[in-house]
Image (spheres, grey):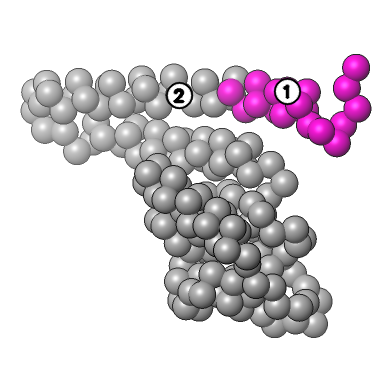
């Protein structure tokens, strides 16, 4: 695929997206990659293209794409005969985030369920904190199920490519 250069306005969007992204505890580089994927009208991008468009090192792009895959925002895309790493953004980036976040909650719940084994004696304070954590994680897991269903319905009702009415 041909190399693409970002316009000044696109570069500004990517950087503003990255600054906003950074405020929710993700790294700025992941935000730059996500900002790029949000505005580039391509089905997938090679690592080298991402590096070139963002003027970023291969290592920074590799680390950012790895984290974004783990969070459910992008996925690897295979191009037969091409040994480069390619990535595509999920069509429903935010629904993918909810699904990924739910996996994190379930993993953390499993860890919290083992906490009783490491508490010693009375340990009233830690026991209370663990109980609150377990209750919160159970509650938020239930909310995620509802939230994802609500999001899917809202997304579908507001999809500009689907006929409504």
The label shown at residue 153 is: 1
Q: Is the residue 97 above or below the residue 57 in the image? A: above
At a point 52% along the width and 21% down the height, the residue shown is 143
The span from disc 1 to disc 2 (Cα, nearest Å) is: 20 Å
Mark nearer the N terminus (1 vs 2): 2
Q: Nearer the viewer, residue 159 or 6?
A: 6
**What is the crowding at mark 1: few (fewer than 14 residues within 10 Å), some, or many (at least 20)?**
few
Q: Is residue 70 above or below residue 46?
A: above
In the figure, is residue 133 to the left or right of 159? left
In magenta segment, residue 126 = no
Q: In the image, what residue occupies the spot 32% across and 34% down? A: 112
User: Viewer-nearest of labels 1 and 2?
Assistant: 1
Q: Would residue 158 be counted in the magenta stretch? A: yes
Which residue shows up at 46% across the image and 41% down it?
104
* Mark 2 lies on residue: 140
At horizontal 79% and vertical 31% (from top left) the residue drawn is: 159
Rendered view: 11 above or below 96: below
Instruction: Determine crowd level at label 2: few under 14, some 14-19, many 20+ residues with C-alpha closer than 10 A.
Output: some
Rendered image quadrant of residue 98: top right
* Foreground residue among 126 and 15: 15
Q: Nearer the viewer, residue 95 or 100?
A: 95
The image shows residue 76 at horizontal and vertical percentages of 66, 63
Quadrant (top left/top right/bottom left/bottom right) for the C terminus? top right
Whether residue 85 is visible, yes or no, is no
Residue 128 appears in view: yes
Expressed as whole percent of the image width and height from the top left, the position of residue 122 reads 8, 23
The magenta span reads 147-165
As drawn, the residue found furthest toward the top would be 165
Q: Quadrant of residue 139?
A: top left
Task: For mark 1, give the secondary structure.
Answer: helix
């Amino acid at each position: 695929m041909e190399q693409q250069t970002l316009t000044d306005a696109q570069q500004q969007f990517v950087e503003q997206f990255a600054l906003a992204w950074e405020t929710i505890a993700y790294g700025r580089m992941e935000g730059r990659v996500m900002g790029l994927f949000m505005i580039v009208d391509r089905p997938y991008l090679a690592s080298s293209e991402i590096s070139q468009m963002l003027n970023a090192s291969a290592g920074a792009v590799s680390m950012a794409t790895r984290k974004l895959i783990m969070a459910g925002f992008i996925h690897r895309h295979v191009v037969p005969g091409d040994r480069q790493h390619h990535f595509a953004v999920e069509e429903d980036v935010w629904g993918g985030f909810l699904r990924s976040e739910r996996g994190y909650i379930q993993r953390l719940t499993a860890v919290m369920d083992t906490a009783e084994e490491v508490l010693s004696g009375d340990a009233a304070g830690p026991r209370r904190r663990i109980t609150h954590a377990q209750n919160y994680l159970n509650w938020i897991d239930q909310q995620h199920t509802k939230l994802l269903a609500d999001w899917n319905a809202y997304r579908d009702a507001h999809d500009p490519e689907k006929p409504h009415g």
